[in-house]
Image (cartoon, rainbow, N blue to C red):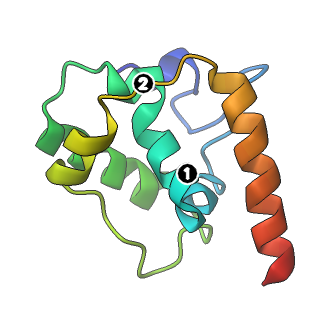
């Protein structure tokens, strides 16, 4: 898993990649967003086994989410990772754009 290829060590983002810091938790608010974090190529094709990938994603969320994840977010499990990662994303940027619109709509309703 090479998160720093698209995100800086501090959870920032690259030119076309949104920052993780203070934002990653918003993806957990919608099912497709939660799956997105597993399906991005850096996660889905990682050499980590399902349990280790779940641990790393949970660490990333706890380390970089700020207030965006809330205190009681549902942690990833190995079985969830196993079920979702077999469908890696091809069109990451297009898919992410749709998700960000859904997240914005969900935030507006709350």
Up-down relation of residue 47 to residue 28 (above or below): above
Q: For the residue carrying disc 1, how many other residues have a C-alpha within 10 Å: few (<14), some (14-19), or many (20+)? A: some
- The residue indicated by pointer 1 is 32
* Residue 40 shows in the view: yes
Q: 54 and 109: which one is in front?
A: 109
Q: For the residue carrying disc 2, how many other residues have a C-alpha within 10 Å: few (<14), some (14-19), or many (20+)? A: some
Q: Residue at x 74, y 26 (%)?
A: 94
Judge from the rendering whether residue 39 lies leftward or rightward of residue 29; answer left or right: left
Up-down relation of residue 35 to residue 6 (above or below): below
Judge from the rendering whether residue 95 lies leftward or rightward of residue 66; answer left or right: right
- The residue indicated by pointer 2 is 88
- Asked which secondary structure carries label 2, the reply is loop
Judge from the rendering whether residue 89 lies leftward or rightward of residue 87; answer left or right: right
Query: Whole-percent x and y of residue 19?
Result: 68, 39
Q: 2 and 36: which one is in front?
A: 36
Assign the N terminus to one quadrant of the image: top left
* Residue 17 shows in the view: no
As measured in the structure, the alpha-carbon distance from the residue carrying label 1 to the one carrying label 2 is 13 Å
Numbered label tally: 2
Query: Whole-percent x and y of residue 43?
Result: 37, 29
Q: Residue at x 45, y 25 (%)?
A: 3
Marked residue nearer the N-terminal end (1 or 2): 1
Q: Residue at x 58, y 27 (%)?
A: 7
Query: Whole-percent x and y of residue 100?
Result: 76, 48
Q: Residue at x 25, y 52 (%)?
A: 80
Query: Whole-percent x and y of residue 21?
Result: 62, 49
Up-down relation of residue 98 to residue 45 (above or below): below
């Amino acid at each position: 898993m090479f998160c720093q290829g698209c995100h800086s060590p501090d959870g920032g983002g690259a030119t076309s990649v949104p920052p993780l810091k203070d934002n990653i938790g918003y993806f957990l608010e919608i099912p497709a967003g939660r799956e997105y974090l597993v399906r991005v190529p850096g996660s889905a094709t990682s050499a980590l086994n399902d349990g280790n990938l779940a641990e790393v994603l949970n660490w990333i969320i706890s380390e970089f989410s700020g207030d965006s994840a809330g205190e009681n977010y549902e942690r990833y499990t190995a079985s969830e990772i196993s079920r979702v990662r077999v469908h890696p994303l091809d069109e990451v940027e297009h898919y992410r754009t749709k998700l960000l619109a859904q997240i914005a709509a969900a935030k507006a309703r709350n």
